[in-house]
Image (tube, helix red, strand yellow):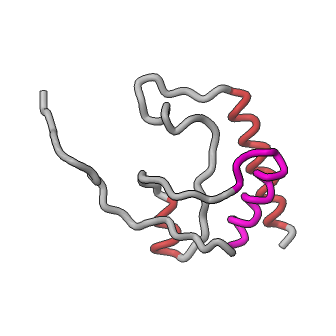
Amino acid sequence: MLRMAGEGPFVADWPLETPDDAAVVSAGRADCADRKLPSQPIGVPYSTDASKLWALGGIAAIVLGPGSIAQAHTAEEYVAVAEVAAAAELFRRIALHLGRR
């Protein structure tokens, strides 16, 4: 078995630096607030492919989804079906919100 020891970060990647005034940020914040969900953008110490959208293409992106980050990418990873359905509705609302601009 290969064992690895060390301190992070193990991945060097672009940060996701979507401007606070980007339409997708405003739509996400508004629609999260409407659903009584946390709506303040936060920074997190993990990587996302969304960072490439901004760094390489100037495409504004947010990372938002169901489930707990504490369970993500673990042997016991799961998301309740009700959370997936609620996220799908939130994504639909954000898309509609953006479509009105």
Q: x, y percentage for residue 96?
A: 83, 59
26 within the magenta span: yes
Part of the protein shown in magenta: 22-39
Q: x, y percentage for residue 78?
A: 55, 27
29 within the magenta span: yes
Q: x, y percentage for residue 14?
A: 40, 67
In the image, what residue occupies the spot 82% across and 66% down?
A: 99
Secondary structure predominantly adopted by residues drawn in magenta: helix
In the image, what residue occupies the spot 60% across and 35% down?
A: 67
Residue nearest the observer in this picture, 13 or 8? 8
Q: x, y percentage for residue 62?
A: 61, 60
Image vertical order of residue 21 relative to residue 95, above or below: below
Q: Residue furthest right?
A: 100
Image vertical order of residue 92 relative to residue 14, above or below: above
- Quadrant holding the C terminus: bottom right
In the image, what residue occupies the spot 51% across and 60% down?
A: 50
- Quadrant holding the N terminus: top left
In the drawing, does residue 30 fall left or right of residue 25? right
Residue nearest the observer in this picture, 14 or 34? 34
In the image, what residue occupies the spot 71% across and 41% down?
A: 87
In the drawing, does residue 3 fall left or right of residue 26? left
Image vertical order of residue 69 relative to residue 61, above or below: above
Image vertical order of residue 32 relative to residue 51, above or below: above
Q: Residue furthest top?
A: 76
In the drawing, does residue 67 fall left or right of residue 3? right
Number of numbered discs: 0
